[in-house]
Amino acid sequence: MPLPRRRFLLAAACAAAPFAKPGFAAAELYPTRPITMVVPFAAGGGTDVLGRILADGMRVPLGQPVIVENVAGAAGSIGVARAVRAPADGYTLSMGTSTSHVLIGGLYALPFDLLTDLAPIAELAAEPLLIVIRSSLPATDLNGLIAWLKANPDKATAGTAGVGATGHLAGLAFQKMTGTRYQFIPYRGNGLAVQDLIAGQIDFMIEPSSNFLAQVRAGTVKALAVTANSRIATAPEIPTVDEAGLPGFYASLWFGLWVPKDTPQDIVTKLNAAVVDALADAMVQARIADLGPQIVAHERQTPRALAALQKADIEKWWPIIKAANISGG
């Protein structure tokens, strides 16, 4: 007797099941519960805010909430370690920066490998640095600053957000490229350093642009150059280092998203698609623009591009860290 149509279709599906691709069903259903995004810095900072904006934007394409978990300490290495140890099931994301996912490898003896223990999802945004001087310093452009530094060896002071921070390493590279010598003054974050720059207690800084734009507009500090090959939309009057006379002196603070290694490729693909959708949303774009960083071009929002960027920055910055004998402890 012929089988009823419904029973026939069910039997056919069961017969085909053994030939389905391993992990296919799990990837098809993913995600079925909330996802945790580990941000390796304290709540309220720029990385935390960007992470929360991205988490909000990913909720709709994923159909599940993305919950930010702040795990701060040791320049981000504690939070990254938390993500590295998580199951490779797509429910723990590692959001971070060039500090937490590049520089810490040169500063600390890590119990994990930044390149092999995490799988990249996408580069998110980047923020070039600004070379900024106190308003009373007798220089009006970048060449003038370099000339002044050469005329006053070991007398000038450069503020940084801490030993081994992006601005510190950029300052070391600046010394090498320009043949200048000056003292670094480490602070616990950029806020206090900017206050001393305004007060004339230190001479200059090379730090992420969003730290200075309000002061530049107010005239309390002078911006000499952007450490990128294009001007920033929020301050188009500031020249690039190429235009200012120091071509190729590029440095930025960038942001990316990773998952633990061995996460199934179908899940990586879904997460990447959710990030791309989020970054294309007009409201997400406006909120990130207000924060300061610039969303990277669509073609850079890929796992391959993030992997290449991370590897290139490791090759660029780790030798500088080691040559300066900088250690995070």
Image: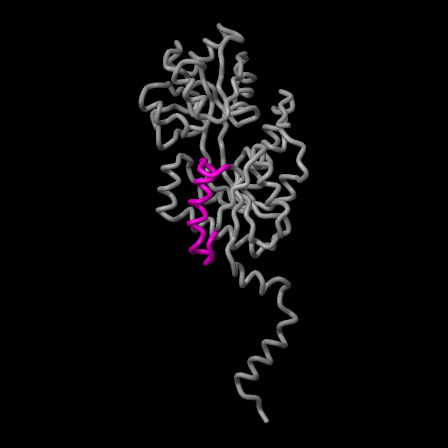
Residue farthest to the bottom?
A: 1
- Side of 115 where 137 appears, left or right: left
> What's the image's color scheme?
one colour
Of the pair 117 and 313, the residue shown nearer to us: 117
In magenta stretch: residue 44: yes
In the figure, 49 relative to 5: above or below? above
Q: Position of residue 199 (x, y in %)?
A: 39, 15
Q: Residue at x 53, y 83 (%)?
A: 6
Query: Which quadrant is the N terminus positioned in?
Result: bottom right
Q: Residue at x 53, y 24 (%)?
A: 162
- Side of 321 where 183 appears, left or right: left
In magenta stretch: residue 12: no
Residue farthest to the top?
A: 151
Q: Residue at x 56, y 60 (%)?
A: 27
Quarter residue 191 falls in: top left
Query: Which quadrant is the C terminus positioned in?
Result: top right
Q: Residue at x 65, y 70 (%)?
A: 19
Of the pair 275 and 195, the residue shown nearer to us: 195
Count of numbered circles on the image: 0
Of the pair 34 and 103, the residue shown nearer to us: 34
Residue farthest to the left?
A: 218
Q: Position of residue 273 (x, y in %)?
A: 48, 52
Q: Position of residue 200 (x, y in %)?
A: 41, 13
**What residue span does the magenta drawing correspond to?**
42-66
